[in-house]
Amino acid sequence: HSLQQSLESDERVLKEQIDKAEADLERTSKRLESLDNIRPAFMEEFDELEKELKVQYEIFVTRFRNLHYLENELDIIKKAEKENQVEREKA
């Protein structure tokens, strides 16, 4: 009988642990679901800043491309002027 009582006691303890774990899981799942539906207070500000960042980045890219183009054009002009100067010195 003591072995049977021991097994029954162990079974009761395990069932209580399982029930407690299931209750914790259900409570945690409900908490997660409620948190998923909440939008943090700073998210609207974050979205606005993200939009502004995209605008500023586009401006930066355009200016960078323009700067690169103008520097290239300047190099071409300087090279042509130098070639003209060399030609005049030869003449």
Image: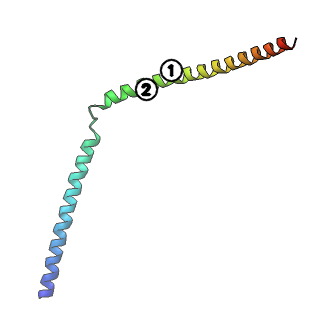
- Residue 47 % position (x, y): 36, 28
Report whether 39 appears left or right of 64: left
- Residue 81 % position (x, y): 75, 14
- The residue that appears at 23% across and 47% down in the rendered structure is 31
Q: Quadrant of residue 86?
A: top right
> Which residue is label 2 attached to?
53
Q: Quadrant of residue 84?
A: top right
- The residue that appears at 17% across and 62% down in the rendered structure is 20
Q: Is residue 40 above or below residue 49?
A: below
Which element is circle 2 on? helix
Q: Camera-side residue: 17 or 50? A: 50
Residue extending furthest bottom?
1
- The residue that appears at 22% across and 54% down in the rendered structure is 26
- Residue 22 % position (x, y): 22, 60
Q: Do labels 2 and 1 touch, CB within 8 Å?
A: no
- Residue 10 % position (x, y): 17, 77
> Which residue is label 1 attached to?
59
Quarter of the image with the C terminus is top right
Q: Is residue 28 above or below residue 77?
A: below
Report whether 89 appears left or right of 11: right
Q: Is residue 67 above or below residue 88?
A: below
C-alpha span from label 2 to label 1? 10 Å
Which element is circle 1 on? helix
Q: Quadrant of residue 12?
A: bottom left
**In the image, what residue type sits under mark 2?**
Leu
**In the image, what residue type sits under mark 1?**
Ile
Whichever of labels 2 and 1 marks the residue nearer the N terminus, that label is: 2
Report whether 75 appears left or right of 63: right
What count of labels does the image hold? 2
Report whether 56 appears left or right of 11: right
Quarter of the image with the N terminus is bottom left
Q: Camera-side residue: 5 or 89? A: 89
